[in-house]
Image: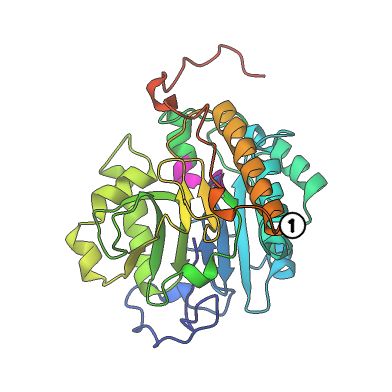
Amino acid sequence: MGLETGTNTTAAGHQHHKSPPPESNNHHHHQTPKLVIIFAMVAFSCLFLYHSSLPLRFPGIIGHRNSRSAAINNNTIVITAINDAWAEPNSMFDLLLESFQIGNQTQRFLNHLVVIALDQKAYARCLKLHPHCYNLNTDGVDFSEEAYFMAADYLKMMWRRIDFLHIMWFRDPFPHFHEDGDFQIACDYFRGNPFDLNNLPNGGFTYVKSNVRTIQFYKYWFDSRLNYTGLHDQDVFNKIKFDPFISHIRIRIRFLDTSFFGGFCEPSRDFDKVCTMHANCCVGLENKVHDIGIMLQDWRKYMLSLGNETATLSSASWTVPQSCRGSFQRPRAPKKRGNKR
């Protein structure tokens, strides 16, 4: 997701009117780097940090030497998070990095990617592959293993995360963000209208401008978990998006078109437009790794066809989901093993 504060300039550099003065969040407006977050769940969440303190979580990241050295000219950085299960060789972290490498002019984002490791093993693996790694210590839960969908550790992880890797990057997403949006979120299913709150969002990829409205919104979203126990952040968002408080703070929510920000639920059909593809509507790390690998093969074939004058570009299509198809029907949370490794 992308976050911006203070100057109210988008990551692309467009000018906006100044935000109204903060009423109760003065402590957020000191001169520290701002944050534009982009959650890209490959489920990796990817964040674009744009000058200011990151609200609610990860207080030590902004100002850290890795974030400073990774900043783009407009002080924007990309942040994503991993744990040991997702950082294993040939697992999600490798696939995310590969998507940046083979995407259409996405390699440049690697220089501005800060990876947050939720455990020591993930941090060690990150250091082997990437120059900008940040070791985050989270008390009270072991994030080193795969967290099963809706299990207790999964819920704790989702409320402490920036996000995990389920999103592959194929093009620069910035041209397709709405200039007037404070909070922009990808969809499992897009109804055709970016203003329609009835769109079915997916929190794996969000772009947020850090300002008074979004700071209030994130605090309310996070606090609302106490009213909706047992739900992860995405489901809580669906509960609160119609809340009168959201209208009261006048936050401008926009839903991203699956033509550009697609996924297994609703794929981006046009290879000439797709920016990201999300392994949503899928449960299980093995299923995701298998199908994302095939997705990357589909993209490579498309990129090769661009240099082949005899190729029929209109024939490009995704051959996924495969293993992910029907994965929601399997048991969600197997019993815990007696002994952890």
Q: Nearer the viewer, residue 129 or 339?
A: 129
Image quadrant in which you'd find residue 88: top right
Q: Position of residue 18 (x, y in %)?
A: 40, 87
Q: Which residue extends farthest top?
A: 338
SS state under label 1: loop
Name the residue at 64% across, 32% down: 85
Q: Nearer the viewer, residue 136 or 211?
A: 211
Whether residue 294 is visible here, answered yes or no, is yes
Question: Which residue: 70% across, 69% down?
Answer: 68
Is 160 one of the magenta-colored residues?
Answer: yes
Along the viewing direction, whichever of 37 and 25 lies nearer the viewer: 37
Q: Residue at x 53, y 69 (%)?
A: 174
Decide: is 106 above or below 143: below
Q: How is the image coloured?
A: rainbow
Write down the region rendered in magenta: 158-167
Name the residue type under label 1: His
Residue 83 lies, in percent from the top left, at 63, 38
